[in-house]
Image: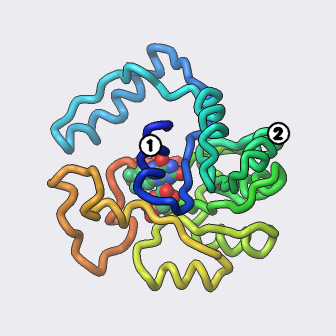
Amino acid sequence: MQEAASAVRKATDRPFGMNLFVQKTPSPDAATVQKAIERLAPLYAEFGLTPSVPAQWCEDFNAQFETLLALKPAVASFTFGILTQPQVDQLHAAGCHVIGTATTFAEAEAWQAVGADAVVASGMESGGHRGTFLGDFQASMIGTLPLVAECAARLHIPVIAAGGIMNGSSIAAAQSLGAQAVQMGTAFLVCPESGIGPPTAKPWPQPRPATRAAPASTRAATHAASSTR
Ligand SMILES: Cc1cc2nc3c(=O)[nH]c(=O)nc-3n(C[C@H](O)[C@H](O)[C@H](O)COP(=O)(O)O)c2cc1C
């Protein structure tokens, strides 16, 4: 994080954001790991890969948070979980604007309640790139546009729309429902700056439905949710 922030600061004096996953370090048992590997195997096979057990499950969030406070980026954004109000207060005291990510209205309201300055409303079109932290994953499968509309109507903080936004007309649709900005992911995978490999980096034909453009992880998450209905 320190290297990344200093590289950005060397390149520009403009404000920038840093983004963290809010998560507890998991300690899954062997059977759970095996089940996950079996479930992922067909997806890996599509690309000629074999799933393996990661050497490290995730970074230590508390250590990352302390580093973030010391680095003081203009924006600190979070996904896959929520901060406490004292943590948000600490970031505000460090001069950071705080943005949370929500997959349901209840999560967006929770971010507003702990003092977030804005919330990303991440609809089900974000697929595997969204982390539900309150309630059932299946019950959180709400489309981006209805989620944005509800958040914009009922919250007093700005809403950033995310999920399935691929072009100007979908940005305009989100804005017309009250989004102040949008956050895009999949659409940037074919940019020159993207780190994805050549087979997937080929330009996609246009027009194409957003869900067809989603990577395997996104399709898997969407399928997992719809097949449990
Ligand atoms: C390859 C990839 C990596 C992503 N990594 C992050 C991340 O580290 N943190 C985050 O908050 N969102 C992350 N996202 C989610 C995006 O910020 C965005 O919310 C999401 O992709 C929106 O859905 P879309 O892919 O349909 O545009 C990622 C998305 C993609 C496609």
Nearest to N terminus: mark 1 or mark 2: 1
In percent of the image, x 51 and y 28: which residue is there? 59
Asked if disc 1 and disc 2 are in contact, CB closer than 8 Å, the reply is: no
Q: From this viewpoint, is residue 29 visible? A: yes
In percent of the image, x 57 and y 24: which residue is there? 25
Under circle 1, the secondary element is helix
Which residue matches tag 1? Answer: 4
Disc 1 to disc 2, C-alpha distance: 26 Å
The answer to whether mark 2 is within 8 Å of ligand 1 is: no
Q: From this viewpoint, is residue 223 visible? A: no
Q: Which mark is residue 156?
A: none
Rendered location of residue 137, percent (x, y): 60, 46
187 shown above or below 221: below
Which residue matches tag 2? Answer: 86
Viewer-side residue, 72 vs 61: 72
Q: Amino acid at mark 2?
A: Pro
Rendered location of residue 12, percent (x, y): 45, 59
